[in-house]
Image (cartoon, rainbow, N blue to C red):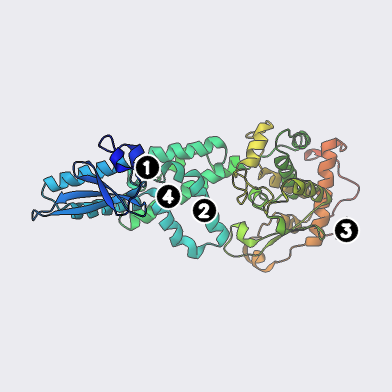
Amino acid sequence: MKRSEIKRRPLSDTALAHLEPEAGAYRELDGSGLYFRVKSSGQKSWELRYKKPDGKWSWLGLGGYPVVSGALARQRAAELRADAAEGQNPIAAKKARKAADIKAANDTFEALAREWHTSRLGGWDVGTAKRVLGALERHVFPSLGKRPYVSIMSMEWMELLRGLERQGILEQMSRVRAYCKDIYDLARVTGRAMNNPLEGVHKFLSSGKAVNYAHVSPEELPALLRAIRSYPHAKDVQLGLQLLALMAVRPSELREAYWAEFDFDEQLWTVPVERKGRKKGREHIVPLCNQAITALTELRQITGAYPLLFPGRSDRTKPRSDTVFLMALRRLGYEGRQTGHGFRHIASTILNEHDFPADHIEAQLSHKAPGVRGIYNKAQYLEQRALMMQWYADHLDELETGNIKPVLTDSGLLPHRPAKHFRRGSGEI
């Protein structure tokens, strides 16, 4: 569009977008001293012609087009004309307004949270730092991140946390609350906030661990195993539930696992220490029973083209949502009765009831023994654990198919123990 074809002013959006460059730069009046400048290169921008306090005329740039639209340029021009009418220098007023905008951006909760996150990096391993920031980006920043942190009320934090509570991710809710409370403590001790709006909020929220680790009773376990086997939705999620039941690992460890961590020939999975949420420690080696190998082989046909076992739907470089297994159990009718973490409780109970050595069970669960014993006992009992977890997988198969007959014991109704089982203090099955 040639400037001779302009029909009206202020300039229409069509004119702004289609004005053609000429041999030399030119300006077209938009109105009230605001001009639209077009360079010979085609670059477009806004300029305001204003009178300085000494009575001389000058130009003030208001930004490039289309980043600065016509509406925004007119708004900025009106503000600067008002400043000039009050005797202020428009350039000084523009700088002050920009500084105020920068300050407002730095006063948001997200900016404060990222500052807090950076300050804590020296005490965290890479995995912990990534998980903490990921939790904030997923659960907090979308709704409250752009708000000035001093303006967010306690009841707004309560509403956000209760939303996580309603999703059933109680442990995550508890962690998010702790992170945000600590973030406000940074603002308070550095003189940028008078109080902490998350103080006392925990008293009116559910306790995460007691509910979040729910697990079915021994009598209900066979039905749960059959329900998982017939899960009618995503096949990779169904296989994930099977693997949680078979290996008794933390749901986050499985959900964030990479195919490169698995050695199918040796039937071992090595969980890097960075993903275990510990500043110190060592990698956790998980022996893979035959049933786990079968499930992993099937899963690899679905997601093996990606680095992660459970790649996200929208971004394949990130793992599935931290609620994926919980939501699957909810769809199966086990809301409040079984969680992904609860499979660890089930395994611990069954293995202890069948007299497997406590050291082997705790090593499988990646638990550290308390006190001095925990410091000096570095044994992983891989061979013994491989035998133990193969027995456990076979036991779950028998429960699922109903081949184990319950017998009455002094301690109540328990599945019948197989003729061969791992005796405490014994090295054989």
Chain-order first, disc 4 or disc 2: 2
* Residue density around tag 3, few if under 14, some if 14–19, many if 20 or more, within 10 Å: few
Q: Please, what is the three-letter code of the amino acid marked with disc 2? A: Val
Q: Which residue is mark 3?
A: 428
* Marks 3/2: CA–CA distance: 43 Å
The residue depicted at 82 percent of the width and 39 percent of the height is: 399
**Helix, strand or loop at disc 1?**
helix
Query: Depth-wise, is mark 4 or mark 2 nearer the camera?
Result: 2
- The residue indicated by pointer 4 is 181
Q: Which residue is mark 1?
A: 18
Q: Amino acid at mark 4?
A: Lys
Counting residues from the start of the chain, the first of labels 3 and 4 encountered is: 4
Mark 1 against mark 3, which lies toward the viewer? 1
Q: Amino acid at mark 1?
A: His
Q: Answer whether residue 333 is visible to the viewer in this image.
A: yes
The answer to which of 102 and 345 lies nearer the viewer is 102
Q: Is residue 279 left or right of residue 303?
A: left
Residue 251 screen position, x and y as percent: 65, 48
Along the polypeptide, which appears first: circle 3 or circle 2?
Answer: 2
Q: CA distance from mark 1 to mark 3?
A: 83 Å
